[in-house]
Image (spheres, rainbow, N blue to C red):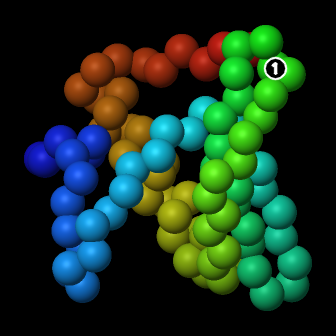
Amino acid sequence: MTDPHEEKDSPQGVRLEGKYANYFEVGYNAFEVLIDFGQLYVDGSNKQLHTRVVTSPPYAKELLRLLSETIRQYEEGFGPIQVAE
């Protein structure tokens, strides 16, 4: 597997930019699912959203499946992920 942090060209030749996210907001309407990505700082006083992804409900469900499978594989290799409460 390649380094997920390495910048690389997409199939269309466009350089992909990586951005760190530890804060997410999700919304929906009858036709779309919206996922906002951003950063929330330790003191919780300053959140900055930087990216919005808009997709259809079927593609959002496929993203959920793909993320679930990726987490399962990660935990197989590295052990359970501890979630802060």
Q: Is residue 33 above or below residue 31?
A: above
Quarter occupied by residue 43: top right
Q: Position of residue 67 (x, y in %)?
A: 47, 51
Residue 63 visible somewhere in the drawing = yes
- Give x and y (percent) for residue 61: 60, 69
Is residue 44 shown above or below 29? above
Where is residue 12 shown, x and y percent of the image?
24, 84
In the depicted structure, whether residue 33 falls above or below residue 25: below
Q: Residue at x 29, y 20 (%)?
A: 78
At a point 62% along the width and 58% down the height, the residue shown is: 51
Q: Where's residue 27, x and y in %?
A: 83, 63
Is residue 24 visible in this depiction of the protein? no
**Residue pointed to by mark 1:** 44
Q: Which quadrant does the C terminus fall into? A: top right
Which residue is located at x 20 percent, y 79 percent? 13
User: In the shown orientation, is residue 74 left or right of residue 21?
Assistant: left
Looking at the rendered structure, the kind of residue marked 1 is: Gly
Q: Label 1's element? A: loop
Q: Quadrant of residue 21?
A: top right
- Residue drawn at x 43%, y 19% is 80
19 vs 63: above or below? above
